[in-house]
Image (tube, rainbow, N blue to C red):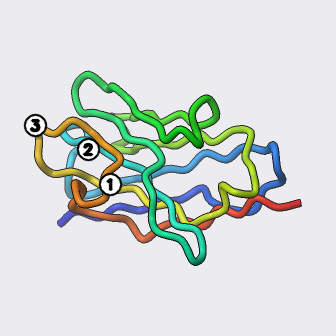
């Protein structure tokens, strides 16, 4: 049974950095597209970044391009989201998700993803 566990969230000042981790058990993540999403209070969940299986091509929402970087460590069965130059508007619960269709190209589309972690809170505030 797949279990996704996000970690690395916390409170950080504007301009600071955090690295989120999405660790999986029960499924080798390297065979699947993985996405990061976030949901701020009172707002819809939105896509942040995703990474393809295989070629490792990555995609980013315009709001985080140049500041966030998604990566994989297949040996650790973990996907990371490095977040730099954080802004108050990045405050949200961040979720990782797995698309189990092995032929998928990753996309920032919530319905594409099958399994979700419980989320980790990121708060950017002075």
Q: Residue at the spot x=75%, y=57% of the render?
A: 88
On the rendered image, what quadrant is the N terminus found in?
Answer: bottom left
Tell me if label 2 and label 1 are in contact, CB under 8 Å: yes
Identify residue for label 2: 29
Q: CA distance from mark 3 to mark 1?
A: 20 Å
Label 2 vs 1, first from the N-terminus: 1
Mark 1 and mark 3 in contact (Cβ < 8 Å)? no
Q: Secondary structure at mark 1?
A: strand
Residue 96 horizontal side relative to residue 62, left or right: left
Q: Position of residue 109 (x, y in %)?
A: 31, 52
Q: Is residue 13 above or below residue 41?
A: above
Q: Which residue is mark 1?
A: 24
Q: Which residue, given by chain and number where applicable, does mark 3 sit on?
A: 103
Q: If the image is split into quadrants, where does the C terminus sit?
A: bottom right
- Give residue 76's position: percent from left, percent from top: 38, 41
Where residue 36 appears, as percent x and y from the top left, is 43, 51
Q: Position of residue 75 (x, y in %)?
A: 34, 35
As displayed, is residue 48 above or below residue 120?
above
- Alpha carbon distance from label 2 to label 1: 7 Å
Between 2 and 17, the one nearer to me in the picture: 17
Residue 3 left/right relative to 85: left
Q: Residue furthest bottom?
A: 42
SS at badge 2:
helix
**Secondary element at image label 3:** loop
Q: Residue, x 82% and y 61% (percent of image)?
A: 125
Residue plotted at (38% across, 65% down):
117
């Amino acid at each position: 049974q797949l279990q996704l566990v996000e970690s690395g969230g916390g409170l950080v000042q504007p301009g600071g950095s955090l690295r989120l981790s999405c660790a999986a058990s029960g499924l080798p993540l390297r065979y699947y597209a993985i996405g990061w999403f976030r949901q701020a209070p009172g707002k819809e969940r939105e896509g942040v970044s995703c990474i393809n299986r295989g070629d490792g091509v990555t995609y980013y929402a315009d709001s985080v391009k140049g500041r966030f970087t998604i990566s994989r460590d297949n040996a650790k069965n973990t996907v990371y989201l490095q977040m730099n130059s954080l802004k108050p508007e990045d405050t949200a619960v961040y979720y990782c998700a797995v698309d189990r269709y092995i032929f998928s190209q990753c996309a920032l589309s919530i319905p594409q993803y099958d399994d979700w972690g419980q989320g980790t809170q990121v708060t950017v505030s002075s």
